[in-house]
Image (cartoon, helix red, strand yellow):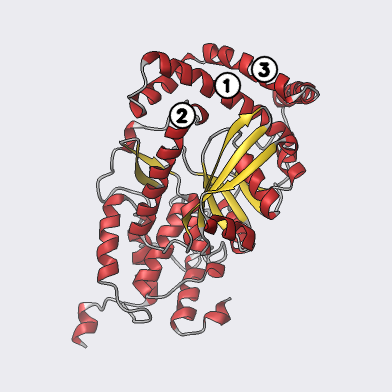
Amino acid sequence: MGLSAAPRQGYGERLVERGIELLTGGLARLPMGWRRGFAHGLAPWLLRLSPRTHRRTLANLAEALPGLDCGARARVARQVSQHICQGVLDGFWLEQLQLDIEYGDAQAREILLAGGGASVATLHMGCYEVVALALQRLTGRCTTLSNIPPWLSRGERLYQRVGIACVRKKQTGAFFKLLEAARGGQYIALHADHHGRDLPVRFFGRATRAPAGALLLSALARKPLLLGYAWQEAPGHYRVRFETLEATPLRRHNAELCAALQRLYTRFEQVIQERPAHWDWSYKRWREEDEPRPAGSSGPQLGLEQAGVGLDQVHGQAAAGAMVFQATPDQRAA
Amino acid sequence: MNISQVLREVLAETLAIDTTHFRAETPLLGALPELDSMGITALVIALEQRFAIEIQPEDVGARLLASLGNLENYLCARLSGWGARWA
């Protein structure tokens, strides 16, 4: 499964791509330690150039980890920026990265080595593509979702060089392409930690909403659900850990999907608390509009309010195979 | 209530849209912004519950949701035990 043909570039876009090529091409000739030095040197400048992002990082840290004092928050924010810088750069030479892969449980290993495919939820930690890279090296069958601008033709080569199949987030029918890949036994790596409109969840004690793509694939393609995350241990060297979230596919039920998402996010919190400097805190993760929506609001009905209804429906559900058409008053009379 | 009516009702309830003017040829996927990944899943769950069927993973695809008529044909085939013919 490859990306569709890249659209024609404008002058500015060509200039940006050429600049990225020159920079990363030059950096690729340097030893990993020097590249880290460059990323760590660049990070403070980026923080200065984007004060709003820096303030948001500090505010998110204060909200989620109240135990950190002001100095500790500033230190973590600086380290986060350095890890993001280095992670983004490492994405340009994925084939050179050294990975140590570990398993949180025996089932995760079995699922990954069985070759039957799985849906793998991941976080924005370390280099964002490292979990997909680990899946590809382990199974030879990884598909991921890319948000790289379509005009950046170099973007697709990054995935192609290491054999990762890629679906563009904005392309028509992207979800069905992922579903097809999952059904075909691919291991699908999807980031699940940033903001999304799909389902409500509590994250670090606050109401928010989250993307549920990894869970939906598990339910619709009937595949296990795993967690995969990575952190940097040394320049060019990442440790990747896989854990089983659901060994059997998630049932197609509102309440189960909501509960599974909450379990995933509870685990996310633990993972982030273990290594706060490795998660991307700069993102606008909690938003005002995330307050629980009143019942009857527009959009697909799969919120927490509906989850309660879903549970009732399970208890009162007709036996499989039974017809549950609701007769009209006329039909009943007949 | 026939399958078509129930289907329109399920679509209206699940996606919070007005389906009173929907016809068999009315396109769904690509035409309804509500039918994103979450909408698709919500619809599959609602159809499975309402019609007491299990929609197989291989049936969930762009063809199934291309139009109201496609979805209706699939449900008719499944409910009459002729699911294989639809596929």
Chain of the residue under label 2 = A
Mark 3 closeness class: few <14, some 14–19, many ≥20 residues within 10 Å: few
Earlier in the chain: of badge 2 and badge 1, it is 1
Question: Residue placed farthest to the bottom in the image?
Answer: A334
Is residue B5 among what the camera can see?
Answer: no
Q: Are marks 2 and 1 in contact (CB under 8 Å)?
A: no
The CA distance from mark 3 to mark 2 is: 21 Å
Labels 3 & 1 near each other (Cβ < 8 A): no
Q: Are marks 3 and 2 on the same chain?
A: yes
A316 or A97: nearer the eye? A97
Which is nearer the eye, A303 or B74?
A303
The amino acid type of the residue labelled 2 equals: Pro
Q: Residue at x 29, y 68 (%)?
A: A314
Where is A109 relative to A195, above or below?
below
Residue with the mark numbered 2: A276
Subunit that carries the residue with mark 1: A
Question: Tag 1: residue type?
Answer: Gln
Label placed on residue A82: 1
Residue A277, percent from left and from top = 49, 26
Q: Characterize the local packing of mark 2: few (<14), some (14-19) or many (20 or more) Cα atoms within 10 angstroms.
A: many
